[in-house]
Amino acid sequence: MFRTRKALGALAATTALTLGAAACSGPAADSQDTATQLRMTVWTSDEAQLKLLNSIADAYRADHPDVAGITFESLPFADYNTTLTTQIAGGNAPDLAWMGDLSSDLIASDALLGLTDTLKATPGWKYDDLLGSVTAEFSRDGTLYAYPFSNSPYALYVNTDLLAEAGQEIDPATATWDQVAAAGAAVNDKTGKAGFV
């Protein structure tokens, strides 16, 4: 999203809340020897992305001397959900994790702790800027459990001439995928061209 740096910073501040991870049960951060070590699982091994994540972590650590280190554990995408759930079940949950379709299962099983209060209390964080349509799948009973780090826009381009040739009409403002599929099939039947891509 538009606040990637701030998001990691705010979430890193709440990493003990994110997965109920080892940071919760570790010793107090009185010295460098007992300072908190944080771990985040990601499904990328792209050097540029890891460099960006490490730069965000370095900036966070500069403001939080009690955090001795932040490491990013790259897990293969194909095995990511299995590896992450195995880590959680085995008591080795990361402090922070990328989650896709797995988030709803983790929320339902109470494996995640809420972020809402912490994010609202973070100075400069504008929690109300988060769109409900973006956070809905990561929330339960008004509490946000996972922060959507990406909010990719979708666009619908309509070839009105092709639709008209097939006797179809689509209103992009109210279109559903079922309507697009039906119009696409009609376009294909009438013209032999792809109805939608």
Image (tube, rainbow, N blue to C red):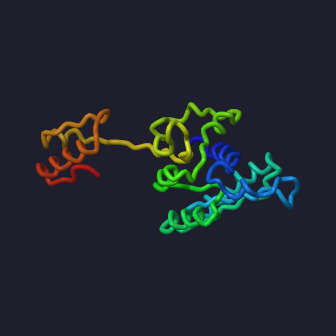
Depicted 139 relative to depicted 52: above or below: above
Residue at (65% x, 35% y) in the render: 125
- Decide which of 17, 119 is in the foreground and name it: 17
Q: Give the total of numbered labels.
A: 0
Q: Position of residue 109 (x, y in %)?
A: 51, 53
Q: Quadrant of the N terminus?
A: top right
User: Which picture quadrant has residue 36?
Assistant: bottom right
Residue at (77% x, 51% y) in the render: 61
Q: Position of residue 27 (x, y in %)?
A: 80, 57
- Decide which of 50, 132 is in the foreground and name it: 132
Q: Position of residue 164 (x, y in %)?
A: 16, 38
User: Which picture quadrant has residue 3?
Assistant: top right
Depicted 124 relative to depicted 20: above or below: above
Q: Position of residue 96 (x, y in %)?
A: 63, 54
* Residue 61 shown left or right of residue 127 in the figure: right
- Decide which of 89, 115 is in the foreground and name it: 89
Residue at (22% x, 53% y) in the render: 194
Q: Which residue reaches farthest right?
A: 31
- Decide which of 10, 87 is in the foreground and name it: 87
Depicted 153 relative to depicted 126: above or below: below
* Residue 188 shown left or right of residue 173 in the figure: left
* Residue 30 shown left or right of residue 75 in the figure: right
